Amino acid sequence: MDIHEHGVCVDKKKQRVKCNYCGKEVQGFSRLKFHLGGVSGDVTLCDQVTFNVREAFRSMVTKQKLSSAPKAKRVHKRGRREISSSKSGSPEEGTTSVEANSALVSDTAVMFMKQKLSSTAAKTKRVFGKVQMCNGLNKRGRLEISSTKSVSPEKRTTNVEANKHDMDFQSDNAQKCIARFFYETGFDFSAVDSPGFREMMSVSGGGGGEMGLNIPGSHDLDGWMLQEALKEVEDHVKKIKDSWAVTGCSILLDAWVDHKGHDLATFLADSPAGPVYLKSFDVSDIKSNANALISLVDGVAEEVGVHNVVQIIVCSTSGWVGELGKSFASNNMFWSVSISHCFELMLVEIEKMDSFRGILDKVNNITEFLYNNPLAWELFKDPSHGKDMKISSSSSEFEFVTPYLTLENVLKAKNNLAAMFASSDWNKEEGTSVSKFVKDPSFWESVERLVKSTSPMIRGLCLFSTANNQHIGYIYDTMDGIKESIAKELSKEERCYKPVWDVIDDVWNKHLHSPLHVTGYFLNPAAFYSTDFSSDPEVTTGFVSSLVHMVKECHVQAKISTQLKMYTLGQGCFDEASQAAQITDIAPAEWWAQKASQNPELQSFAIKILSQTCEGASRYKLKRSIAEKLLLTRGMSRCEEQHLEEFAFVHYNLHLQRCKATN
């Protein structure tokens, strides 16, 4: 695990590093490991880091301490073996077989067992080694000579007790990690009782033997351990909710239809502190009732705190969600469709254009033909045709992008394909249809034009799939940049780029655009203080709309208007803060937090705007089957229903916590 992914250097000269979880600063990345790992020392401990990250760095720091600790010198007779290299074995023994044979346990469990086995074995060998040497006799009953000082029986007992305490601690952590694995993945608890699971854990060092760790049973997972996990998750969620007073949050709505035709919905709240699962609903009976749906959403917003909700983001423009969006046009909360879904709509419409119709189908025919025909594939890979190319692509987190990435690869492989079909080894009776359009210049012209029309959009979307989830300050400028890039790619020929622009503008105006976007553009110092900032009427109108929606008190609005003049003129605290060196490499919301304390009302307004995302719930890839079980299981008692609600709350929030940590 790379420590540099969990902190950021805020002062290279003083070597100050800021924790990504709690925001505290420490002296260097080495101390950040202690801070995150919860290892006592000269640093405060992080109270917001996830369990797995904490345990990973705790293990890392422990190993470093052990490896750097001076070892007692031992003097042996020739041929005598050192005690510490006896039957305890290597801590990594069995790891490979666990990874190869485990179909049930994910990287979470395997990673934990590696960490625990390494740190526990090292500590145990060190303590047991001293005790054995103090017995004074080797296997043949002869006195073992050692430079280690003799240990009194009292000291020996203390060492054993300390080791037992450490083993108990490791066992408790192992149980928690196993439980978390089941809660997070949603696997059936009965799997933990299976002989195969216990054998696997035993092989990995997780159960049985002198250093074995207790494995919980299904009743433990479904009982007291679930209640403990619920308490920990509730504490984690509370910390996130406490941050909403400063950053605000976005409510994300994930809607779908299950295989039996039920209309279901899950609500999340997203903020810089992390995403939180709120509730799930079966809306099948009210999907045609706009007032009932609005009341449902209002109820979720009230639970979050209406004053904390900046916007609602959905992942669809059709069905009851699309109709609800139209009804929300006059509501107090801003409504927007997730940026990835809007990009998907744009790409679909572009591909439908007459000049591009059927191109993706033909490209798909090429890839299928190559992979299903060994001879064609071998000819295609022939080094004499040039650089070996990878045709298909699945490198994007958005599935709808994959065909366009493949399209780019096919265009790069144009010469390889031409050489392959021109080869004398080629059996011309096979793949005639593919050969026909591969040899057609108009096909390649269309492919090239489609790539030029869509690649700027793909690159733009990648900007919004990065770890920084605060998109509002960038989206307005980025969309303009995408359009300009498309025009440039198409040689500024209006007849070529104008139809693509029209598609982008249509989706933007109908589904994506929100006054928040132009407000974010205005409040982003990197954009506002740049030479190409555009202060057209749309920006001014959007800013006023956002201010009126989000700030209800007239006297606060007046203060913000006064402070806004200082920002626009670059005066007061903004004089130095508006310099390029003060803006580079800092997120817009963080810039306002650091530079605008003299203008608290404007600062608070700006931070809430700039802390919001433009992406919906789909990015978190929630396991919908858990919500379906909760909402559609019939005949449950209230107690059983509450138990399932608690599990869903734990499952989804652990999953979201991991998404935040890994990103």
Image: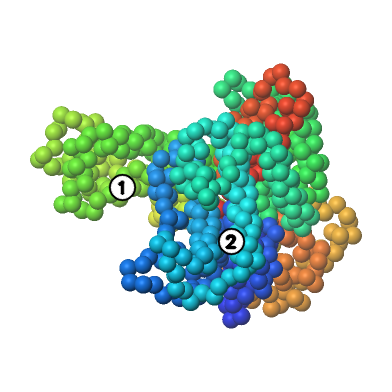
Look at the image and tell me whether residue 448 can be seen. Answer: no
Examine the rendered structure and indicate whether residue 143 appears above or below residue 324.
Answer: below
**Residue under the point 85% across and 64% down:** 559
Q: Position of residue 65 (x, y in %)?
A: 54, 69
The amino acid type, in three-letter code, at marker 1 is: Lys
Residues at discs 2 and 1 in contact (Cβ within 8 Å): no
**Residue under the point 54% across and 54% down:** 116
Report the residue marked by disc 2: 58
Q: Position of residue 594 (x, y in %)?
A: 71, 70
Judged by depth in the image, the label closer to the viewer, 2 or 1, is 2
Residue closest to the eye, 420 or 35: 35
> What secondary structure is found at the residue carrying circle 1?
loop
Sequence-earlier tag: 2 or 1: 2
Residue closest to the eye, 194 or 661: 194
**Residue under the point 58% across and 61% down:** 58
Report the residue marked by disc 1: 390
> What secondary structure is found at the residue carrying circle 2?
helix
